[in-house]
Image (tube, grey):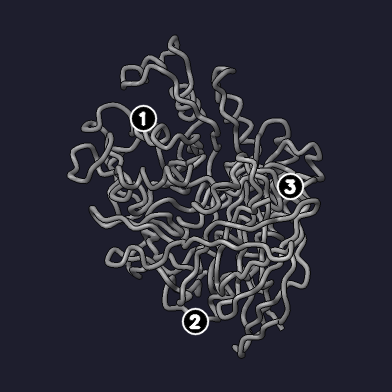
Amino acid sequence: MNIIKHGLVVLGMIAAPVFAAGQVSISIDAGKPGPVINKNVYGQFAENLGTGVYQGMWVGPKSNIPNTRGWRNDVVGALKELHVPLVRWPGGCFADTYHWRDGVGPQDTRPSNVNGGEVEVINAVGTHEFFDLIDMLGADAYVNGNVGTGSVQEMSDWVEYMTADGGSPLARLRAQNGREKPFKVAYFGIGNELWGCGGNLKPEYYANLYSNYETFLRAPKHNKPKIIASGGDTTWTDVLSRELKGRTTGISIHQYTIAGATWETKGAALGFKEGEWISTLANTLKMDQIIKDHGAILDKNDPEKKIGLMIDEWGTWYADADASSSALYQQNSLRDALVAALSFHIFHEHAERVPMTTIAQMVNVLQAMILTDKEKMVLTPTYYTFQMYVPFQDAKTLPLAIKDNTSYTLGATTIPGVSATAARAKDGKLYLALVNTDPHQPVDVAVDVAGTKVKGAAGKVLTSAAMDAHNTFQYPQAIKPAPFSARAAGGKLSIKVPAKAVMVVALVE
């Protein structure tokens, strides 16, 4: 029997793995396209935390590490391969201690401070530098404002500084600092985690604050950002969706996946046993019910579906690699790749309500795409998962049914053996993504597409012999995707998905 604590499964006694036999069947109805998977579901988060920005992405224009205007060329090049659609900055909890004027003007005159006792925040990366990164990536900007230690005036000034045309005094200041043309702020968030690090507020009080702040966020109509409210649990979603209707584009929620049962026992990134493999995946799957719970409230208060559920912090959170550190650096293994893929499948399922997510974070912090050490860079299994799923950006979801699914059981925990999602991409191709959660057994998947004969499949698969397979600076290609193809026989397509694997294929129709 499972014991539920804080929404997580506490595993019972560990027993031998149990496997269900038989072939899994997947049917896809390509004639009934559903909601579009907003490309921003594949957004990224870059907080001034640890070495996530400084050292990880930003080395400064005088560094010996090849860079463009201070941003590492290797990191930017790798991120461009992911077609990053959106970047959230500067936080996170950091946002509610960040004063934007500290990050504009000549870099050698900017004040310096230490955040979290770890890495000196020199304010070299401010508004202009962030938008340099946005331009290099070809992404949209999601900027988080300071409610916790800021003011209505400060936030109003920042939005004007970024978005106003030339006649504004703050636009003239922006021009003096090197940018005459306004920046394009796609989304602007009013605070972060106001229930906690952002100020320990009540939702009703924040709703009033939000209305006050939002009133004074003046921007030209042709360059007005979409405004996002900082949410929390379902009580916050209920209050904000009632009180702020018509005044917000979305309400954010945060959800992290741990391996253990509590934050005190959240497990290690590497060297874990199978019990932590299955518990991590089981905890990942809880995202589906979380979205349903918040979605039910939004359906009641916002039946027109004008308020999006923005999951702007998600991903795995393990014990720090260095127990004395608070920089949130952790390694990234095959298990994290499966967490990302399972999360994508859930986001696709709720595409109508979830138009944006941003994983925490891009580089060196939590479930990162990239790890760096001085001049060295390594791509993580999560990076490769994002790369494999690029075709799903702005693709149209397709109805998919799984029949005779296998189960993967260990002790008191059981999860589905196969997870799948399908969509018609902008290139016209039909893509199918598959996850086999079982770390021991491959699975045969029979694929049927209504109304057409599938001739084959071609794509990539990510797997390895070890559950915690990962890349290091010494062995940077220990795990990476491999080509995969299959041909139909007798008009039927069968795909063998390896154990503990993520697979994305284009179906040949």
Which of the two residues, 336 or 485, is positioned nearer the viewer here?
485
Q: Earlier in the sequence, mark 1 or mark 3?
A: 1
* Between marks 2 and 3 in the image, the one whose residue lies nearer the viewer: 2
Q: Is residue 376 left or right of residue 400?
A: left
Vertical order, 465 against 29 (above or below): below
Q: Are marks 1 and 2 in contact (CB under 8 Å)?
A: no
Residue appearing at x 51%, y 57% in the figure: 385
Q: Earlier in the sequence, mark 2 or mark 3?
A: 3
Q: Quadrant of residue 62?
A: top left
Question: Looking at the picture, how far across and down is residue 10, in whole percent?
Answer: 62, 78
Which of the two residues, 19 or 245, is positioned nearer the viewer here?
19
Circle 2 Cα neighbour tier, 10 Å, few/some/many (<14 / 14–19 / ≥20): few
Question: Looking at the picture, how far across and down is residue 78, in whole percent?
Answer: 38, 47
SS at badge 2:
loop
Label 2, label 3: how far apart the Cα atoms are: 39 Å
SS at badge 1:
helix
Question: On the image, numbered disc 3 is attached to which residue?
Answer: 238
Question: On the image, numbered disc 1 is attached to which residue?
Answer: 128
Question: Looking at the picture, how far across and down is residue 64, in whole percent?
Answer: 17, 44
Q: Is residue 79 left or right of residue 192?
A: left
Inspect the image, locate mark 2, and give the three-letter code of the amino acid beneath it.
Answer: Lys
Q: Is residue 229 visible?
A: no
Label 1, label 2: how far apart the Cα atoms are: 45 Å
Residue appearing at x 43%, y 62% in the figure: 480
Question: On the image, numbered disc 2 is attached to which residue?
Answer: 273
Inspect the image, locate mark 3, and give the three-letter code of the amino acid beneath it.
Answer: Asp
Inspect the image, locate mark 1, and give the three-letter code of the amino acid beneath it.
Answer: His
